[in-house]
Image (cartoon, grey):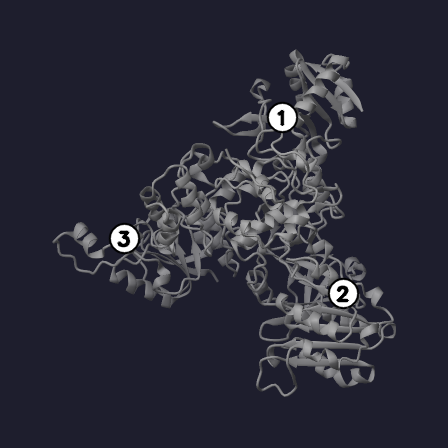
Amino acid sequence: MRYVKIKGDKIYEFLERLKNYGKLYAPVKISEKFYDRKEIDDVGEIAFDYQRTIMPAKKYFIPPCEEMFEIDMEENEYREKLEEVEPFVIFGMHACEIVALRILDGVYLNEYPDIYYERRRKAGIIIGLSCLPDEYCFCNLRRTDFVDIGFDLFLHELPDGYLARVGSPKGHKIVDENPDIFEEVRQEDIDAFRAFEEKRQEMFKFKGNFDNIRYILELTMQDKLWDEESEKCLGCGNCTMTCPTCRCYDVQDIPEIGGKKGKRIRFWDSCQFRSHGLVAGGHNFRETKRDRFLNRYICKNSYFYPLGTSYCVGCGNCTYFCPANIDFQENLMKIRGREVIHE
Amino acid sequence: MRMKIGIHGLTSCYGCQLKMACIEEILEVAKNFEIVYWNMASSKGEIEKVDIAFVEGSVVTERDEEELKLIRENADALVAVGSCAIHGGVQGMIFGEDYEEIFREVYGDSLIDYEAKIGEPLRKYVEVDYCLPGCPPEEHEILYYLATFGIGSYPEEKDYPVCAECRRQGYPCILIEKGMPCLGPVTVAGCNAKCPGFNVACIGCRGPVPHGTAWFDSLARTFKEKGMSKEYIKRRMEIFGKQYEKLDEMIEKVFENED
Amino acid sequence: MNNMNNMNNVYSLYKCRVLRVYDLTEEEKLFLFRFEDAEIAETWTFTPGQFVQLTITGLGEVPISICSSPMRRGFFELCIKKAGRVTDKIHELQPGDVVGVRGPYGNGFPVQEFEEKDLLLIACGIGMAPLRSVFMYAIDNRWKFGNITVINSAKTGKRLLFRKELEAMRDVAEAENIRIIQTITRDPDWPGRVGRAQEHIKYANTSPENAYVCVCGPPQAYHDIFTKLIENGYNPRNIYVTLERRMKCGVGKCGHCIAGSSTFLKYICIDGPVFGYYDIISTPGLI
């Protein structure tokens, strides 16, 4: 792998240069506690120390709501709405989110590639950024705390700048075209990188991994823990909307008055909602709140074969953004038989 | 042939009708539908056979009840429009309270020529085919409902909460962040989380999520953990949710081990 | 065909014209379709058990299993139950009307694997729709298969799907070693066989050790059918079922058909809708 260094005083210049490659999106503070990614005009606004964004990066590839087709009702035609996708750069993606994006790739670019997603994915440059975990993070248990591929550049924090891993031809191009920004990596940078990685590992709330969790979960589906926890659930869908790998959508045809035109839209849906499991004739495969609650645990913990990981990347968003304070990580720890003690 | 519609108001603020009158595409609507009755817009017209009757307001007087039954008899399909018609509305808050006392408080000794009822949703009196929620309903939903009727079908009604739209809009969650008493989790979506988007906690004006999936109990527990009192929570949830089945029970359950 | 759309857009619709409409029961109708584009019409094919996404313009899309034989090129049939917003409207379709279709999707029945074996088809209610495709395919390729039995069940005689078609061919079929068993569970006026589908497995002309079995019915029916099949000596490994979900995309994206458990999570649309017996019994949540 190719490694280069960005000196601390050059980082803002680097971010300015990124704008040459497309619209720059990066995390900014949007309220007292929350962050989200926005289009960046002033690079000084970028929040390097953000932990998580309320909207995962999936929003750039699967928008919360998009028009797929324009309907010509007189001709019985659905004309696709494929607008020009301009190149863009997402700065500051954490390792877990990059893995999440690869999971979305696996789903959206399978044997039936989704052209809407594909076009955006091809237009996007991904710049990763290292991070330190908070109490909600459990990417270590999911083995997604360090990412090998799926980015163009990945920046690791150093005391005096960033060590950048180059992960794609696009990444090489950025490095080659901006020689004044990058420099050689020295021994002390390597030492600092190692120290950062060690420190990161030390900071996780729980150690170990979740490799066996899907089997334990399957064997404990009748556990009363699920009754108690689902009882607390508001059914609001925040957990799925803020999940970087939740990708369920619903489709709706909206005719216009007069019945001549209309549009087919799709928008983020959630398995926490009643109609998600409904089939023709009224049978519901996820009839109760418990069914729907448990469904998310099942889905997230199941195996995504193409990547050899679970659908959950351990980002902690579902816990952090749960208004009812339901702790996903702890619940999994509990069914594994671990006693979780709160101070 | 144009579809015939009637737009009716029982006891309410007439806001839903006003909203319908103010939609930008009102001329398109008038072109494509024959509006045979709309008291708010025209003094002409009598209740006659229509394809679709839109009814706002709740049944508060005997006259309301008679009118509603007449509307129903003359309509192929009946749409309950707005929170009053669907859930009883704000005036429905007296449901379950001491009627006599409230009556005295409101009317005193003055003579009124009708018997006031407790504001109840239309479905208590007649069969309701569709619900168009809102207080008032959103323009895009009014148009969607009309358009689906116009092509000989009917709308897909939303059955999920405001939170979904709040997250799709990318707003910060004010319930988590500021501990505001936001009723988004139990309120049916459609407004694109307008109020939370302006940092105002959802008051539940669109009414509870249908099909028994408004979890007032879980939300009451969440509010309680944030330090809100039972009285406050109850009052807030009752504004638009008073007639939600088992609302009282759901709140009581959360506080039962208190005293 | 929508020439304006990108060839690679999997959600693009292709126009199909309704050629004929047959009333089957009070709730189900059979529609004969042909793609408007002659080339697609002649080349489009599928495997029995696969489904299409059918759009009524301006209203929405529903997944429907194909119920004709793939051997009849140029045409396909869908048996559609009136069960909601879109299907209500489908029932109003008349010959000449146009709908949008995309597909076929999903893994159908492994019909090649069935060759040279006996074939037992067990359908409850609307379950006859996908199995009719297998049945018609087997008839069109009669020489490739051994004995064939269809058990077609419903609550009442009026609700028995493809009743006339199957009755009309019953006697001729018997001579061809094809047995058609129609059974009714709740109809005092029904003159024929009564009882649930599984109670008639013993009357099939198929030899248990040499047969493949396809089952389609409501989720609650499967358990008893499996038990009876195994009691009668059928090999669990040769039992296949086809499942129902409300797919919104049909191509493994929208997540509405995700089912199963944490060790076997499947998109019914692309991993199914046909699953083997062992998948079903080792996976809570599939049926």
Tell me whether circle 3 and circle 1 mark residues in contact (CB < 8 Å).
no
The extreme left residue here reads B109
Q: Which residue is mark 1?
A: A132
Residue B223 horizontal side relative to residue B106, left or right: right
Q: CA distance from mark 3 to mark 2?
A: 60 Å
Mark nearer the viewer, 1 or 2: 1
Q: Residues within 10 Å of mark 1 (few under 14, many from 20)?
A: some
Q: Residues within 10 Å of mark 2 (few under 14, many from 20)?
A: many
Residue B24 to residue C75: above or below? above
Disc 1 residue type? Leu
Disc 3 residue type? Ile
Q: Are marks 3 and 1 on the same chain?
A: no
Tell me whether circle 1 and circle 2 mark residues in contact (CB < 8 Å).
no
Q: Residues within 10 Å of mark 3 (few under 14, many from 20)?
A: some
Residue B71 horizontal side relative to residue A176, left or right: left
Marks counted in the figure total 3
Give percent across and percent down for residue C19: 69, 68
Kindly tell me whether residue B236 is visible in this rendering: yes
Residue B217 horizontal side relative to residue A111, left or right: left
Q: Secondary structure under badge 1?
A: loop
Q: Which residue is mark 2?
A: C48
Residues A337 and A206: in front is A337
Q: Secondary structure under badge 2?
A: loop
Disc 2 residue type? Pro
Q: Which mark is residue A119?
A: none
Give percent across and percent down for residue B70: 33, 66
Residues C2 and C162: in front is C162
Q: Which residue is mark 3?
A: B94
